[in-house]
Image (tube, rainbow, N blue to C red):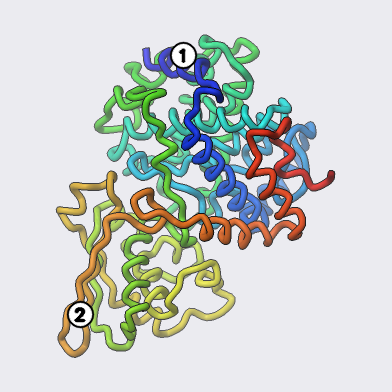
Amino acid sequence: MLSEQIADFTVGLHFKDLPSSVVEASRTAITDWLASVAAGSLEPPAVKLAGVLRRAGGNPQATLIGLNEKSSALNAALFNGTSCHILELDDLHRSSILHPAAPIISAAFAAAEERGASGRELITAVVAGYEIGIRVAEAVTPSHYYYWHTTATCGTFGAAIAAAKIYSLTTDQIIDALGNAGSQAAGLWEFLQDGAMTKHLHPGKAAMNGLLAVQLAEQGFTGAKRILEGQKGFFKATAGEFFPDRAVAGLKEEYRILGNSYKIYPSCRHTHSAVDLALQLASEGLEPNDIEKITVRTYSHARDLVGEFTCDTPYKAKFSLPFCVGVALADGKLDLGSFDFSVPVKPIVKEVGARCSVVVDPELEKIYPASWAAAIEVTLKDGRLIEIRTDYPRGDPENPATAEELQNKFKELVYRAWAKDRVARTLEHLKNLEKLDRAGSLIDWKE
């Protein structure tokens, strides 16, 4: 029974057994998560959600990060998980097609604040949640991803495991929690048609539902015992093709958190390989006005999700590979300011984006999702052809961002929400996370 194997792994995972590389990977994930949450909490979708949560009320158990307010742990998981995903800068695990931090760390941190858990307990919970959330996603990838937003669905399982570790649930209780988490796992891609805020809600609900499943299990509320592999379970219901063994293969032998990727550009990750190439061409002196046409060759999920040129709204632009390539070529960068539409989009960006087509390359299709590759063919007005390719976007383990880049990203985002002295204090706490008696002190705004 898969749930029993997952539960046994969770109960048996201890901080003292974690390799130092895994502890560091967890620290990086938590640091990156915190930055996206703090900055995202100030954006319109988060502000609207905060208004709803304030009206509902809640015991002050955990923090709505960025707002310096406390509410129930469930509300905090919902708010922080939602905020984390808004700016499109949260982490990604490639082979699972999962943004793990938003659902998993949001649930773990809310539970840790509520229970007064230590830094070591938080790290262990995050590792456990990443291991299971990612493996469940790998078991249904890639067919699941056509209709279902993996971060919303599989993230619910990871969130439940992370919270279960903080709550010190027994094996039987974790099985119940997984059963009830799986029945709440949802999230459809239809939001893309409208550029709707629903996408931001997905990881927030995954965090909240995972934590709720744990709270219920602690009270003896039972759940399906075979929620993953059962005849009417998650695998059969949500994937045309699935691989059950992937959900438990290599537990405590291979740590999936070590394969995590970190985003440098605030756009859908499916745009990043092409953006890397466009920035390379810009740095080499390619002039946008010299371009006759651009063909981006990639895999089908990228073409389907981000293949159209649009700059109707900032959010739709983040899901437009041609737009992102156009900005990169015209400006030599792609950052948060690139999606500030209070300034009109440059005509040259529109011109270059409109000349950019996205097609499926059979070779790149074969290696996805192990590799999120792209190749660019630029035809110049004088007839010359430029061709370049990358298999790993910046921030992948094979093409990692530097520690300085990630720290600069953290500061840029967190300075939007916090004063500099608080940011410096938080960075110091993060460096010593495993020594903290109380993980919640990471985001204390009063000391």
> Who's the residue at 61% across and 54% down the image?
40
- In this view, the residue in front, 416 or 409, is 409
Which quadrant of the view contains residue 362?
bottom left
Name the residue nearer the viewer: 45 or 65. 65
Mark 2 or mark 1, which is nearer the start of the sequence? 1
Kindly report the distance in space between the C-alpha atoms of the residues bearing marks 1 and 2. 57 Å
Residue 298 vertical position relative to residue 312 in the rendered view, above or below = above
Q: Quadrant of the image for the C terminus? A: top right
| Amino acid carrying mark 2 in the image | Thr
Please give the residue where the numbered disc 1 appears in the rendered image: 8
398 displayed left or right of 293: right
Q: Is residue 138 visible?
A: yes
What residue is shown at x 79% (from left), y 34% (from top)?
60
In the rendered image, which quarter contains the N terminus? top left
- Identified at 31% across, 55% down, the residue is 392
In this rendering, would 282 be left or right of 41? Answer: left
What residue would you read off at disc 2? 379
**Circle 1 residues within 10 Å: few <14, some 14–19, many ≥20:** some
Secondary structure state at the residue bearing disc 1? helix
Asked if residue 193 can be seen in this view, the reply is: no
Residue 93: percent from the left, percent from the top?
Answer: 40, 43
Q: Is residue 111 above or below residue 46?
A: above
Q: Is residue 229 left or right of residue 312?
A: left
In the image, residue 348 lies at what x, y percent?
39, 84
Mark closer to the observer (1, 2): 1
